[in-house]
Amino acid sequence: MTAAPTERGATSRRPLDLRLVVSVLLLWTLLRAVSALLLWRLATQHQDPSVYDDPGVARYFQFATLWDGQWYERIATQGYPDTLPVGADGQVQQNPWAFYPVFPMLARGVMALTGWPFAVAGPVVATVLGYAAAVVVAGLLAEKVGRAGALAGVTLLGAYPSSPTFQVAYTESLALLVLAAALWLLVRERWWAAGAVALLTGLARPVALPLGLVALVVVLARWRDRDRRPLAPREYAAMASALLGCGLAGLVWPAVAWARTGRPDGYTATMSAWRGGADVLPFLPSIERAQWLWGDFLGLVVLAGGLGLLVLAVLGPWAAGLGLALRTWCLGYALYLFAALDPWTSLYRYLMLLFPLFVVAAGAGWSPGEGPHQPRWLLTVRTVVLALLLLGWQVWWGWYLFRFVPPSDYPP
């Protein structure tokens, strides 16, 4: 996997123009309307009414604030605790420090301006951020694979099974927005801005490690190209700022938790509470989950096969058009999920940040002028068929994973 000879020059010829923006907004509105209909039916006809506690707020909005949304509501209305709750066994219990602050603070600002309760402000903020994220994703993809490929990628992203979380009180919209912005800035070699946005991700979503890998690879590729495009001293400083921003992004929220609670392990101890107080060991949860689902041997085969298919999808010529930064992101983020995640139902949401792979799935990831010749309408047909399949999967996801079954259930 090597960088294009002039990646910056090759990408700058496809700007994010008004026509593309309008197309994305209309397409995203259609997909969000489908998800809204699904959420409304679940909220009003299939959800146990005992979960609703505010007769003054429509059930749709209360439904859109379940699961993690309740933690964000607590943060928006009460803030973060100064001490970590500890159980009788001495273990730190689940608490708000596991959740990053940008989204609930934005919702809190909307609440202050409008007087809305969080049940309304949270989903509204997420929905608006989702529109912004879709536009930024489209711009990034258009620079790499063209307008048609970008629209195909946005379509499949918006139809993905867990895409309703782009309009509920979750951080998926925010995470997608800041990530896509950081990647786009790295692709365009806007080093200072990339470092600043990367630092913002440290207060929005824990993606600093794989994003830092992307920054390192892109910076090294630029350094290797210094004979053809000489580097000025100020650009060395700018590249260092991008790396520094990514590095600090992974430290800023644990540092804030330490400063507020007085515990150096405040953040990590909180995260371990979601695993029953068990230590967070790299890779082991993913391996154990696969073996639990498919058996000791077959689980390892399935896991290895899935990882192998991912590597093949990213490194094959059908993904060459994505460029160095996006291919590195897909591999780095997948490795990060494999190492750090206890992959259960939340995996659906986390995989949405692998949005460049939707372009590959639609067959639009080839480099310009390469790949098999095919009529333009074939990309549209392929995208529509895949989107319909994903929307059907979305119905299953909403019914089995987002609908809450009291008194306890698995989060999505």
Image (cartoon, rainbow, N blue to C red):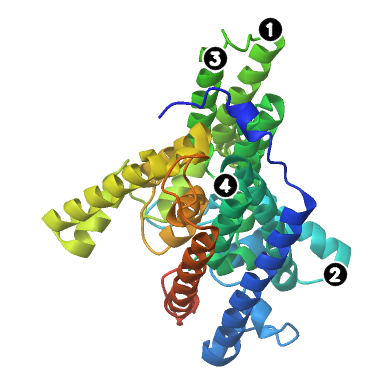
Q: Residue under label 2, please give it.
A: 115
Q: The residue under label 2 is which amino acid type?
A: Gly
Residue at 57% x, 37% y is: 258
Q: Which of marks 4 and 2 is nearer the N terminus?
A: 2
**Mark 4 to mark 1 CA distance (whole Å):** 32 Å
Of 302 and 317, which appears nearest the observer? Answer: 317
Mark 1–mark 3 Cα distance, whole angstroms, equals 15 Å
Q: Earlier in the sequence, mark 4 or mark 1?
A: 4
309 in relation to 384, above or below: above
From the image, state whether disc 1 or disc 2 is nearer to you. 1
The structure residue drawn at horizontal position 50% and vertical position 48%, both measured from the top left corner, is 356
Q: Which residue, as the protein is rendered here, is positioned at the far right?
A: 113
Disc 3 from disc 4: Cα separation: 32 Å
Name the residue nearer the viewer: 344 or 309.
309
Residue 245 seen in the figure: no
| First reached walking from the N terminus: tag 1 or tag 2 | 2
In the picture provided, is 106 more to the left or to the right than 399?
right
Q: In this view, does 358 lie to the left or right of 169?
A: left
Q: Which of marks 3 and 4 is nearer the N terminus?
A: 4
Which numbered dot is residue 225? Answer: 3
Q: Mark 4 points at which residue?
A: 205
Q: Which amino acid does label 4 sit on?
A: Arg
Determine the secondary structure under disc 4.
loop
Nearer the camera: disc 4 or disc 1: 1
Q: Position of residue 41 (x, y in %)?
A: 58, 87
Report helix, strand or loop for mark 1: helix
Q: Could you classify mark 2 by the number of other residues whose Cα lies within 10 Å: few (under 14), some (14-19), or many (20 or more)?
A: few
Q: Could you tell me the amino acid type at mark 3?
A: Asp
Contact between labelled residues 2 and 1, with CB atoms less than 8 Å apart: no
